[in-house]
Image (cartoon, rainbow, N blue to C red):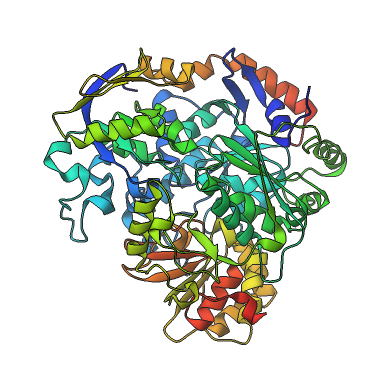
Amino acid sequence: MEKFEKLSGIAAPMPLVNIDTDMIIPKQFLKTIKRSGLGVNLFDEMRYDNDGNEIPDFVLNKPQYRQAQILVAGDNFGCGSSREHAPWALADFGIRCVISTSFADIFFNNCFKNGILPIVMPQEVVDVLMNDAEKGANARIEVDLEAQTVTTSDGQSFAFEVDAFKKHCLMNGLDDIGLTMEKASAIDSFEAKAAAARPWA
Amino acid sequence: MSGKTLYDKIWDDHVVQEDADGTCLLYIDRHLVHEVTSPQAFEGLRMAGRKVRAPEKTIAVPDHNVPTTAGREDPASMPDDSRVQVAALDTNAKEFGIHYYPVSDVRQGIVHIVGPEQGWTLPGMTVVCGDSHTATHGAFGALAHGIGTSEVEHVLATQTLIQKKSKNMKVEITGKLRPGVTAKDITLSVIGATGTAGGTGYVIEYCGEAIRDLSMEGRMTVCNMAIEGGARAGLIAPDEKTFEYCKGRPHAPKGAAWEAAVAYWKTLFSDDDAHWDKVITLKGEDIAPVVTWGTSPEDVLPITATVPAPDSFKGGKVEAAKRAIEYMGLEAGQKLTDIQIDTVFIGSCTNGRIEDLRAAAQILKGKKVKDGMRAMVVPGSGLVRAQAEEEGLAQIFIDAGFEWRLAGCSMCLAMNPDQLAPGERCAATSNRNFEGRQGRGGRTHLVSPAMAAAAAITGHLTDVREMI
């Protein structure tokens, strides 16, 4: 997994609430057996018309946001389906950080497995960041995971919370399966104990 | 010290290791797998030279992509990309030695219907699947939730998940339901009350007389949509109905093991003095048959209501409601019962069980669907289909003008050929009314099976209470 330490990037504003994973990557693109190549279909039905032409009004089609690496989004981002194709598509497009007042649980976890940092901020901070993102390509937002801060283009800085273990994995690009496999003996003993207590399971 | 909730008890019995910051390694008893969210996980195992740690606890079934029309055992019946995905599951199931129900097996169906049906899902277990509607299994008092593909790979390799504990939320539905009101109306009404993010960070336990009165099928419908309220999982404490449902299922314990299991299952309830971080109470008698008008499951109202005005909402929801009303082709103030529909879909992991088909057939018996209506029933599993045929339900649907399909997820997420065309409007018993969910430009109104049947007959959203 790609490490995440610091990011200074263009932030695209997506104030819509309840952006679901069907919007992020519609089901017709779930038939892949690979993780890569989904960026071109990110937000497909919002981004392209029925003939496959770009819809100019959609934020990521605007010249100033085509290189966006950060999304500032409305409440409950990533709700709905568990499809990890959503963070795969975001990462493949180049998005490394999403900032919102709240995220759906499964999407939130999936981001950390794919080098994407989801940041929860209170409404008033999201409002400030949304305004900054509205300024376009000249307004780069800085995200520092080590220091746990987000800084606007005019220097306003806000602290955010992140789970210590998730931060550690993201900063070091760690594969948590490898980490868990080191605990195999603890899993063995649990299984032995559980097999005695609940043999039917 | 206060007592424990049901969630606390199941959680405590599955913690392999806990770190100082509360990060836990949680043991997983059952891992359900389908073709869409697993190929990359198996490929990851292969690349790293890893095995499936507990193949005997891993159960796979293709459901999302599969056609629901006759002749589907022939791989040529599927488009290339679907065929590749289903073939990958075939290969992975064989190579890694996990339990498998291919489309040619009568037990095949939607993974969340097959699990309970075959007795894989039992009270007190931890159950995961790369699918958000894994919450369904919570109806058995099992801690069940959806995971992403990286976590699927983690569970395949280690039979565990790295997790932090969620908070406890109690949703109590007191008293009795009124006639025409079903489990679907309960679960949608709860989401209407809490919003789609109201459960975020929580595991919900549903309780109260109206929940206890539900059958296992109804309880599965309620828990299925816990995820639509944002909760990690939904739970219902097991009781005699649960035990009765599980008894004799192919993978349920037998003999002395059964007795021991039941003795343990009887300890699975929330203590009177348990701590709840959030409590929601609804009166069963206040719940009406409901329907969604917008593009989020929280956009739900009693069938007697009208499409709301966007400025009746607050914050970001004002814009979202405007967008939803435009997408849905509606007008504020329009009566919900005036909304004309052209498609009816009965099925899905929310409402594709035998009781759902009985409820719809009861309304349809001796009636015909409206001229021009496209109506389909997609049973949740081959066994549900067979039982419905035996009970004469299939004939009622066919006589009424419904298509009688084979089992799968079908038009709930429209990954197979069962889709809405742009502008088509569907009364669906599924779980999501998102933009494009049932096909690009398609419009979805979520309803109960009885309400779907009523709409099929009249051609518009209809108060089923007028038909019973």
Residue in the picture at 70% in, 26% down = B12
- In the image, A37 versus B118, the foreground residue is A37
What x and y, as percent, mark residue B269? 78, 39
Residue in the picture at 15% in, 51% down = A56
What x and y, as percent, mark residue A19? 37, 46
Q: Would you say residue B14 is visible in this rendering?
A: yes
Apparent side of residue B12 relative to residue B397 in the rendered image (left or right) = right
Q: Is residue B75 above or below residue A158?
A: below
Q: Would you say residue B109 is visible in this rendering?
A: no
Q: Is residue B346 above or below residue B269?
A: below
What x and y, as percent, mark residue B427? 48, 69
- In the image, B370 versus A146, the foreground residue is A146
Residue in the picture at 73% in, 58% down = B214
- In the image, B70 versus B125, the foreground residue is B125
What x and y, as percent, mark residue B47? 39, 27
Residue in the picture at 39% in, 58% down = B310
Residue B143, by quadrant, is top right
Apparent side of residue A102 relative to residue B127 in the rendered image (left or right) = left
Screen quadrant of the C terminus of chain B: bottom right
Screen quadrant of the N terminus of chain B: top right
Residue A33, by quadrant, is top left
- How many marks are shown on the rendered structure? 0
Q: Is residue A188 above or below residue B438?
A: above
Residue B21, by quadrant, is top right
Apparent side of residue A138 relative to residue B5 in the rendered image (left or right) = left
